[in-house]
Image (cartoon, helix red, strand yellow):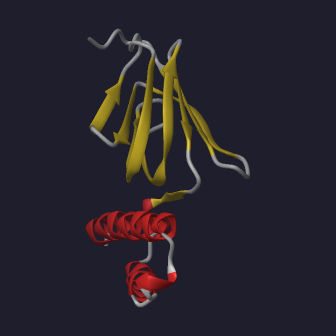
Amino acid sequence: MHTGKNIRCVVVTPERTVLDREANLVVVPSFDGEIGILAGHAPTLARLAAGELRVSGGPGSASYFVEGGFAQVQDDVVTVLTSRVRTLKDLDPTRLETELSELSLTVESSFSAEGQKIKNDKMNAIRAALRLARREK
């Protein structure tokens, strides 16, 4: 139940802290489905899928694309650790389609099993970004 209290959302990439703001709702794209987080949420650690991170309340609402990672909820702070985050307006469908096409042309036999998994994960992330980009345009 929403208590009227705010939570803090912090998004961190290997390069820097991208976002640090107050919100009343944060929705993260976990591998098991979306998780909505309000003040007073139980401590949680979730593996993220590539998808939409939504932050509502505080100074307004915003949506971002995250390329997987982890989310931790503790003491009314949601910390998202991700390799890459972009605003939805920064997702260019044409560029994403080109990336996907080029990646799909790489020869599977040139990859180890781990390399094939990395390629598939990257293709899935691009597809997720493309779905969001097309929705925004």
Q: Is residue 94 above or below residue 51?
A: below
Which quarter of the rendered picture does the N terminus lie within?
Answer: top left
Residue drawn at the location 49% of the way across and 68% of the way down:
90
Report if residue 61 is visible in the image. no
x then y, percent, for residue 80: 54, 37
Q: Is residue 47 above or below residue 110?
A: above
Question: Toward the viewer: 35 or 102?
Answer: 102
x then y, percent, for residue 45: 46, 26
Q: Is residue 48 left or right of residue 134?
A: right
Which quarter of the rendered picture does the C terminus lie within?
Answer: bottom left
Q: Is residue 100 left or right of residue 1?
A: right
Residue drawn at the location 28% of the way across and 38% of the way down:
34
Residue drawn at the location 50% of the way across and 77% of the way down:
111
Q: Is residue 97 above or below residue 74?
A: below
Report if residue 136 is visible in the image. yes
Question: Toward the viewer: 47 or 62?
Answer: 47
Q: Is residue 131 left or right of residue 47?
A: left
Q: Is residue 52 left or right of residue 111?
A: left
